[in-house]
Image (tube, grey):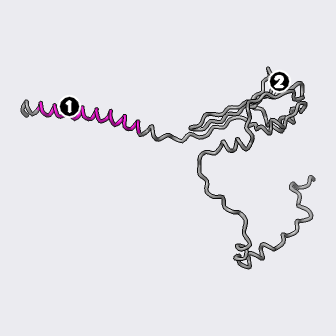
Amino acid sequence: MSDLQRRSVRLSLLFVASASLVACGSLNSASNNIAGLVTPYKMDIVQGNFVSKEQAAALQPGMSRTQVSDILGTPLLTSIFHADRWDYVFTFKRQGVAPQARRVSVFFQGEALARIEADDLPTEAEFVASLDSGRRSGKVPVLEMTPESLQLLPASAKKAEQKPLPALPASYPPLEPAAR
């Protein structure tokens, strides 16, 4: 090979390598732009106890700890340093929506409810409405047969529908064998 041919081969290899590096750089920025359009799914994160406005309104001073627990559920936070205080904390994180965070603190004097401190709480209906994820739901089907559709049923289905249920047994066998 002559010196001129070697130089032209080297020059062409250098040109191909340079073009490859430039292509990689522009391909990287193009792929980043495309990846920015597509976002991965992030699941909703719900933590803590949801306390509605109706639940908070049901609490009355003087209620026992058991009664409060029956209405609000088990508190998320209890502390040995604050034995007369229960905290109900609720957080809800969803992709594309600002996170929700609410706190309800219940204070006791001995075993009786003394007072409640709470953030602005939604009603149950407002909370359920806020859970709408933007999915379109179709028309809700009617789950009741009309008199016209009952007439179209075969005779065997009509008889089965009118047949009374069998009587319940007078007694049931024991679940465990008798002790000997």
Disc assigned to residue 14: 1
Image coords of residue 121 (percent x, y): 74, 35
Q: What is the magenta range?
A: 6-33
Say what secondary structure mark 1 lies in: helix
User: On the picture, is 121 further left or further right than 39?
Assistant: right
| Residue 126 spot, x, y in % from top left | 71, 42
First of labels 1, 2 by sequence position: 1
On residue 83, the disc is: 2
Amino acid type at mark 2: Ala
Q: CA distance from mark 1 to mark 2?
A: 76 Å
Q: In the figure, 144 relative to 39: above or below? A: below
Estimate the x, y position of residue 24 in percent, counting from the top left.
32, 35
- Identified at 88% across, 24% down, the residue is 109
Q: Secondary structure at mark 2?
A: loop
Quadrant including the N terminus: top left
Q: Residue 52 occupies which quadrant of the picture?
A: top right
**Residue flagged by tag 1: what amino acid is it?**
Leu
Left or right of 11, for residue 160: right
Whether pointer 1 and pointer 2 mark residues with C-beta atoms closer than 8 Å, the reply is no
**Label 1 crowding class (10 Å Cα cut-off): few <14, some 14-19, many 20+?**
few
- Residue 174 % position (x, y): 89, 57
Count of number-bearing discs: 2
Residue drawn at 73 percent across, 32 percent down = 120
